[in-house]
Structures are given as structure tokens and as C-alpha cells.
């Protein structure tokens, strides 16, 4: 898939648009933050559960072809139980971060479309 070269702000916008449609496809109602700051990007509702979401674009370092996501939440995000939704710009796929869990991501948690 073609990788789009965007500035940092646009990369975040691009990832958030993908996140909204991915969440819709997975049965969530989505309410986006109307500002560009704060500990969350959107609120996702499904089956009576509320998930506070911060979308992060994955990056790769120069030594590895593997994209990795930021998994370090701020103290405020930890207090609010914010979950990162990680966006891979090369594949345009998303996955939930596993905060506080170590090891490989089991296939059943790779709910990527």
C-alpha cells in the first residue's frame, strides 16, 4: 500500500479519520473531541461500555522495519483509563494497545480490519 507523506498534524488527523470508521465498522458510536488538545481524541460507546480513546500513529525507528506504537500514557490518561488505538500508516490498520500487558499480542486481540 502506498505510504502518504504528511506533516505531523495531518498524520494525526489522517489516523483519527481511519479510527472513527474502524470503530463504526466494529459497532461503536463515536464522539470526537472538538479541540486539538486534551487527554483523549474520542469517546467510543458499545454495548453500554464507554471507552476513552487516544489515537496514536505508529512509527518505526531507523534500525527496524517494524512499526511500533507509543504505549506510554500520561498520568492523567492513566487516571481516566484512556486506551490507545494504534494506527499503522503503512498498512492503514488499527489495533488496541495492551496497556500494562507484556508479550506478543494474541491473534484474538488483533481485531484489525
Image (cartoon, rainbow, N blue to C red):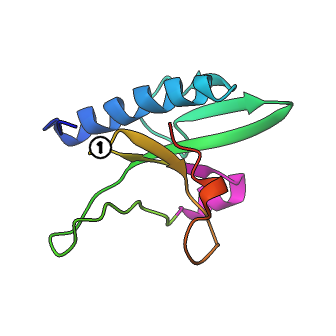
Q: Secondary structure at mark 1?
A: loop
Residue most extreme to the right: 48
Q: Nearer the viewer, residue 76 or 29?
A: 29
Q: Nearer the viewer, residue 102 or 74?
A: 102
* Residues in magenta, as a range: 73-84
Confirm whether the magenta stretch covers residue 81. yes
Q: Quadrant of residue 103?
A: bottom right
Q: Residue shown at 17%/76% (left/top)?
A: 63
Residue 71 image offset from top left, x and y in percent: 49, 64
For the N terminus, the image quarter is top left
x and y percent of residue 75 in the render? 59, 64
Q: Where residue 29 sits in the image (x, y, percent)? A: 68, 22
Farthest residue, direction front: 107
- Picture quadrant where residue 73 is located: bottom right
Query: x, y percentage for residue 80?
Result: 70, 52
Q: Residues within 10 Å of mark 1 (few under 14, many from 20)?
A: many
Q: Residue at x 59, y 42 (%)?
A: 53
Q: What residue is pinned by disc 1?
A: 89
Amino acid at each position: 500500500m502506498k505510504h502518504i507523506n504528511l506533516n505531523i498534524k495531518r498524520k494525526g488527523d489522517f489516523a483519527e479519520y481511519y479510527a472513527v470508521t474502524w470503530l463504526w465498522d466494529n459497532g461503536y458510536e463515536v464522539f470526537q473531541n472538538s479541540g486539538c488538545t486534551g487527554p483523549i481524541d474520542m469517546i467510543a460507546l458499545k454495548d453500554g461500555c464507554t471507552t476513552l480513546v487516544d489515537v496514536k500513529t505508529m512509527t518505526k525507528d531507523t534500525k527496524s522495519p517494524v512499526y511500533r506504537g507509543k504505549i506510554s500514557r500520561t498520568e492523567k490518561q492513566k487516571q481516566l483509563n484512556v486506551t490507545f488505538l494504534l494506527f499503522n500508516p503503512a498498512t492503514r490498520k488499527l489495533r488496541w494497545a495492551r496497556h500494562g500487558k507484556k508479550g506478543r499480542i494474541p491473534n484474538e486481540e488483533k481485531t484489525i480490519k
